[in-house]
Image (cartoon, rainbow, N blue to C red):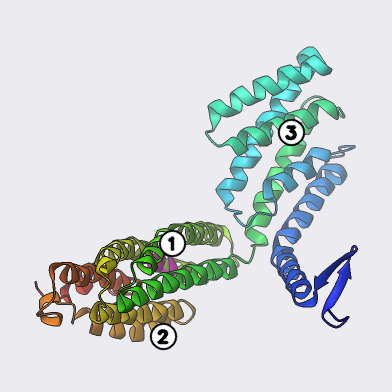
Amino acid sequence: MTNDESSTTVGVVVPRSRLRSTLSRRAVRVRESIPAIAQIVVAATAAYAFAHVVLGHAVPLLAATVTVSSLGLVRDARPWRVAETVMGMLVGILIAEVVLVTAGSGWWQIAVAMTVTLLVARFLSPQPGFALAAVVQSLIALVVVTGAPFLRLADGAIGGVAALIVTALIPRTLRRTELRDADELFDAFDVAVETIVRALRRGDRARAERGLERARSLQTYVDAWSGSLESGREVARISPFLRRQRSELQRHERVRAALDLATRNLRVVARRAAYLCADGESRPVPADLLAELSRGAQLVRDGLDDISLEPVARDTLAAITRRLDPAAILPDGGVGELNLVAALRPLAVDLLVAAGMPSADARALLPRI
């Protein structure tokens, strides 16, 4: 390996292409974290400054730690999640303050406070994160004893309010994240369909089984898009800077819901394709129909960025849907092949709904069978 083809990092020879790829991923991670970092820095600094300068608290540590812990660097910064985390931490601080006032501080008081905090937190919320946030802040409040009784509870409340304010005033780049999740779902959908199409054209049972596995794995991508889209919608609901995105996010939710159903119907198609391919015979007609539906799905994806492309997607998918009469397409087809074409009908309807057509109108396009 020449010097131009490798680079040494910490005594290890690493190919330059891999090194560039690693550095690129890290740079992307940093760039995507900048809005979250801005939220955390602004909120924590403002909370600490308000408690220290305006209210005169000597060391308002919890004002900053509550802010940092409630916001975090995770991309899911929905207001209710932030509020829930803040409430958990305030519960922990309150219990610690009560223990300090009644029993003082010490090793056994820490054990008592942590036990009570965990029990109360588990009673109040089913979320494990709620209990963990509460017990960590309870521990900090008992170990770092400063100020008058219940003063740190006020600091924690200040930090929580600051976290909720910056969630609205400094929104994270949720639209970019949401669109990336949508891209990943559509790409995975396309790969699954392409695998099934190739299996049908070759009568390849093993490939059809891989297509079924890929179709089953689509739920992970659906869930990821659901999470980022829900985050975007909730933040846009309270942020004055994201008002124009509300209708767009609502449209994306319609696409997501329809595509969720489409992935479920694709699994039905994949199972029937795997069954058909057991005999090794080629099925070009259903393969071509499924490939056409996949091209329509990609037009739906293009419509997420540009709503003017939705009519093109609807027209393309409508033309395919009108032809989905199994008996007319395959007059000499076997039962299994006819059933496979029939399974494409609900898939076509779901994609039409994703493209903006009402469900009843989409179903009306199907030929009677």
> What is the residue that sits farthest to the front in this orientation?
280
Separation (CA) of disc 2 from disc 3? 51 Å
Residue at 46% from the left image edge and 76% from the top image edge: 304
Horizontal and vertical percent position of residue 186: 45, 72
Which mark is first along the chain, 1 or 3? 3
Please state which of residues 132 and 91 is positioned toward the viewer in this rendering: 132
Q: Secondary structure at mark 3?
A: helix
Q: Is residue 192 left or right of residue 174?
A: left
Please report the residue visible at 68 percent of the width from the left and 62 percent of the height from the top.
170
Q: How many marks?
A: 3
What residue is shown with label 1?
Answer: 218
- Between the C-alphas of marks 2 and 1, the distance is 27 Å
Q: Relative to the observer, which residue lies in front, 100 or 158?
A: 100
Boundaries of the magenta span: 251-256
| Residue under label 3 | 137
Nearest the eye: 194 or 147: 194
Query: Which image quadrant: the C terminus?
Result: bottom left
Query: The disc labelled 2 sits on which kind of residue?
Result: Ser
In percent of width and height, residue 218 lies at 43, 61
In the displayed structure image, the side of residue 160 where residue 122 appears, left or right: left
Question: In front: mark 3 or mark 1?
Answer: 1
Q: In which quadrant of the rendered view does residue 287 lie?
A: bottom left
Disc 2 on helix, strand or loop?
helix
Label 1 sits on a secondary structure element that is helix
The image quarter in which residue 103 lies: top right
Location of mark 2 (residue): 308
Give the overall secondary structure of the magenta segment.
helix
Q: Residue at x 57, y 53 (%)?
A: 78
From mark 3 to mark 1, how far is it between C-alphas? 39 Å
Circle 1 residues within 10 Å: few <14, some 14–19, many ≥20 = many
The mark that comes first in sequence, 2 or 3, is 3
